[in-house]
């Protein structure tokens, strides 16, 4: 299965600022996903990062707040914009297909103060 | 929207005990996945199930895809200390050649009995 490198692994940010999280995969993948995991909670899909077109966002998530880039088949970024304490979560990148299974990065633990 | 009910929410294990957890849904899925998440890490895929009634093992772990397609269970036999962590089920419905999104349960936290 694919190996995912996610950076940064953690950060503490001031409210009102933005943080960009990077996801690098060791092989070309069609499907890349970004999830949020709030403290003590399960995983919620933010969006599917599409190569060459705009990301597909899930209900409750908007591009202005979580802009996503997918410049090629091995890399994607998620930006958390204009952060507030409610954005404190773990953000996870995932790749895969139904046939191959879905692999997750180790996550970015974000604390907004 | 689709929701998964995962139980139990938490449980304590003693080394050597068997452990069982399950997920149920009001909707059908055609893929069930079981993940384990350790602190500070992302979820790691344990078992993937693709057919109703399928029973699959991975070492001491066994999972089944319910015949109604609305439930799945995960069993861990002869638990060891490194089994501690949070276990998530996830369901996926694929339709018309498109991959549906993964829907995650709320997790089962496994801890060691004091």
Image (cartoon, coloured by chain):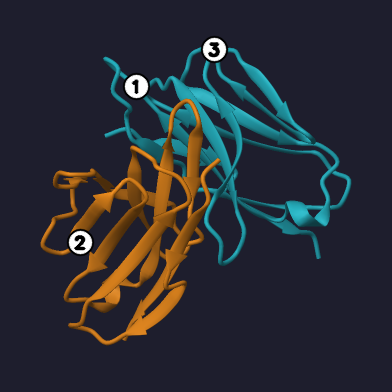
Chain colours: A orange, B cyan
Q: Which residue is mark 3?
A: B67
User: Does the residue at mark 3 contact the one at mark 2 (Cβ under 8 Å)?
Assistant: no
- Chain letter for mark 3, please: B
Give the image location of residue B20, x and y in percent: 70, 36
What element does badge 2 sit on?
loop
Mark 1–mark 3 Cα distance, whole angstroms, equals 17 Å
Give the residue at the far right of this rendering.
B16
Q: Is residue B66 above or below residue A78?
A: above
- Left or right of A5 on screen, residue A56: left
- Chain letter for mark 2, please: A
Q: Which residue is mark 2?
A: A66
Are there few (<14), some (14-19), or many (20+) residues within 10 Å of tag 1? some
Q: Quadrant of residue B101?
A: top left
What residue do we see at 48% from left, 25% from top? A99
Give the image location of residue A73, x and y in percent: 33, 45
Q: Which disc is residue B94 wearing?
A: 1
What residue do we see at 34% from left, 54% from top? A75
Q: Quadrant of residue B97?
A: top left
Q: Are marks 1 and 2 on the same chain?
A: no
């Amino acid at each position: 299965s694919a190996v995912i490198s996610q950076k940064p692994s953690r950060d503490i940010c001031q409210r009102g600022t933005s943080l960009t999280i990077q996801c690098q995969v060791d092989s070309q993948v069609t499907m890349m996903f970004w999830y949020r995991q709030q403290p003590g909670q399960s995983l919620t899909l933010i969006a599917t990062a599409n190569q060459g077109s705009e990301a597909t966002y899930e209900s409750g998530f908007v591009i202005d707040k979580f802009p996503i880039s997918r410049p090629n088949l091995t890399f994607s970024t998620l930006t958390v914009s204009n952060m507030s304490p409610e954005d404190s979560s773990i953000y996870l990148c995932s790749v895969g297909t139904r046939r191959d299974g879905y692999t997750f990065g180790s996550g970015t633990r974000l604390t907004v103060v | 929207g689709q929701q998964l009910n995962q139980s139990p929410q938490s449980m304590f294990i003693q080394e050597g005990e068997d452990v069982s957890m399950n997920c149920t849904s009001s909707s059908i899925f055609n893929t069930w996945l079981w993940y384990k998440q350790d602190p500070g890490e992302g979820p790691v895929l344990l078992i993937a199930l693709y057919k109703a009634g399928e029973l699959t093992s991975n070492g001491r772990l066994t999972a089944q895809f319910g015949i109604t397609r609305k439930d799945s269970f995960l069993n861990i036999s002869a638990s060891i200390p490194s089994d501690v962590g949070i276990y998530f089920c996830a369901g996926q419905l694929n339709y018309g050649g498109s991959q549906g999104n993964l829907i995650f349960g709320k997790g089962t936290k496994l801890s060691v009995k004091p």
